[in-house]
Amino acid sequence: MAHDIQQSCEQNPTSWVYSAVQGMSDEMQTPLLADTEAPDDPSLLTPGRPTVAILGSGDFSRSLAVRLVACGVSVVVGSRCVKRIAPGLFPHAVELRNQEGAVARADRLVFLALFPEYYPSLQGLRALLAGKVLVDVSNAVELGSSAVSNAERLAEMFPESVVVKGFNVISAWTLQTGAQDGNRQVLLCSDSVEGKSEVAQLTRRMGFQPVDLGGLCLARDLESVPLRLFPSWRGPVLTTFLLFLFFYGYGFIRGLLLPYLAYGRNAFFRLALDLVNESLPAVALVTLALVYLPGLFAAWLQLWRGTKYQRFPCWLDVWLLRRKQLGLLSFYCAGLHGVYSLCLPLRTAARHRLINAAYTQVKAGVEEPWDELGVWRSDLYLSFGVLGLGVLSLLAITSLPAVGNILTWREFTFVQSGLGYAALTLSVMHTLVFGWDFAFSPKAYTFYMPPSYMIAVALPCAVLVCRCFLLLPCVSARLTRIRRGWESTRKCPIPQHHHGVGNRTLPEV
Ligand code: NAP
C-alpha cells in the first residue's frame, strides 16, 4: 500500500499528500522533543543542533522536513525559486533558501529530493557540495533497466562528495505519519562507511531502523525495490490460476459440454456457482500438496546424494521459497469453497429440485427412507472438511510475521510441518469420504473421464505415501544424520566419527 501511495504522490505532486501537509495540525509543525523546540524565527536556530539541507520543495521534501523538525533537527530547504513556495507549506521552523544558501547552511547532510533527471542542474553547486554527504532518495523509472543507478551517476558527477543511497523505499506518507504506522526499515548503501553511519544516526533519530545493505553497487537493486509488484507471489498465483483453469475447463467439458452434445441436456446454469465450487476444492487440494512436495524432493535428493552439502537445483530452491505463498493460496481457495458450499441451498435451482422431489413423493405417497450410510457419509465428509479448514486457518495465522516471530523454531516446525500434514490428511479424507465408493462405479467415468476430485486427490495421496515412507525409522535416521552434517563415504573420503544416540552408529540404507 505504501508503494501505491508513493506512486500516486510521484505521479501527482499536488496530490492528497500535499493537502495532508497543508491540513497538518499545529503540533506537527513544531518539534516533538521538549528540549529541542524549534523557534519560529529561522535565524534563531540552535547552533548545537545538526542542520540538514534538502534540495527541492516537493512532496518528499515537505514530508522529510516535517519529520526532521519533529525530531529536533534544524532543516533548511533549498529551492530554485523560494517565492513560489506557498506560505505555511513547510513548518515554521524550516528555513527556506535558494539552493546555494541551503547547501552552505548544511553541516554535512544534503538530501536531494528531486528527480534524478535534474541532478546535472546541480553542477554549479559542485564546489559547495564538496565534502558533504549527498543522500539520494530517487527511484528507478522502470524495472530491470540495465542503466547505471542514479546514485552511481550522482557519485560520478560529484566525486568530491560522499553519496549515500537511502530513504527511497519510504513514502512521503510514511515519513509524515511516522514509523509506527508503516514500514520502519530504511535501506542504505554507500561506499563510505562514515557517510553511511551519519545517515544511519539521523535515521534512528527519526524513529526508523537503518539497514546497511553494503556498497553503492547495490543502489540499482535498491532503486527498483519500490517498483516491484509482488515478486514472490507471481509463480504461486499463476500456478493456482492455471490449476483453476484446468479443473474448471475439465468440469465444463465433462459435466456440461459433452452431456449437451451427446444428450442435449442443458445444464449451463451450473457454470456460475456449481462448477466454481467443484473446481475450488480441487485447486486447494493440489496447491496444498504442492506445498509439501518440494520438501519431499529435497529429502529424497539428500538421501540419494548421501550429503546435504550439494546445492539443490535452482527450480527446487525457488519452489521451496514459495511454499508459504502456495499454502496461503490453498487456504484462500479452501475458504472460498466453504463460503460457496454454504450458499448452495440458497440457489433457486436447489430449492426447485427439493420442492419438486418432495411434491413428487407426496403425490406418489412415498416417504424418503432413512439412509444410515448416507447420513454417516455426509456428516463425516463435512466434519473432515471443517476440521481441515480449521487447521489450514491456524497455518495461515502462523505465517504472519508478527505471529511466526514469537514462535520457537520447534513450535514453528510443529505448526508448519506437523499441522500442515494434518491439514493435508484431513482434506484428503474429506475428498475420499465425499467420493465414497463412487470410484468403483462405472457411472463415475462418463465419457471415460473421472470426476475432477478423483484427479485432484491423486497428488496429495502420493505426497502422504512418500511422507509415510520417509517416517520409516531406517530412512528417517539416515536423513537425520545427513541433515546433521554426516556424509556418505561415496561423497566424503574424510573419515567421520559420527555417533548416533547412545553411541550407536546408525545403519546406512
Ligand atoms: P516533486 O513533488 O515533483 O518534487 C520535486 C522537486 O524537485 C520540485 O518541488 C522542485 O523543487 C524540484 N525540481 C523540479 N524540477 C526541477 C528542475 N528542472 N531542476 C531542479 N529541480 C527541480 O517530487 P517528489 O515526490 O518530492 O520526489 C522527489 C524525489 O524523491 C524523486 O526522486 C522521487 O523518486 C523520490 N521519492 C519520492 C517519494 C514520494 O513518496 N514522493 C518516495 C520516495 C522517493 P524546487 O522548485 O523548489 O526547486
Image (spheres, grey):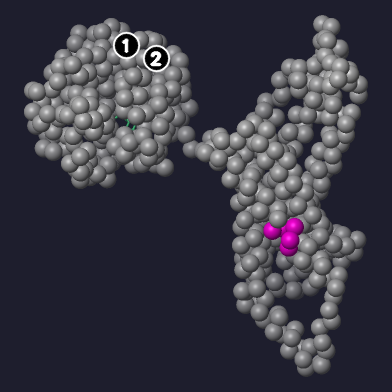
Q: Are marks 2 and 1 in contact (CB under 8 Å)?
A: yes
Residue 392 higher or lower than 50, as above or below: below
The residue to which callout 1 is attached is 162
Which amino acid, by three-letter code, is at mark 2?
Answer: Ser
Question: Left or right: 142 with respect to 282?
Answer: left
Name the residue carrying label 2: 190
Residue placed at 35% from the left, 10% from the top?
194
Q: Quadrant of residue 294?
A: top right
Q: Position of residue 45 (x, y in %)?
A: 13, 22
**Label 2 residue SS:** strand
Q: Which residues are magenta?
A: 382-386
Q: Which mark, residue 195?
A: none
Mark 2 nearby-residue class (10 Å; few <14, some 14–19, many ≥20): many
Locate residue 350, reporting x and y percent.
67, 76
Image mark count? 2
Q: Is residue 256 visible?
A: yes
What's the amino acid at mark 1? Val
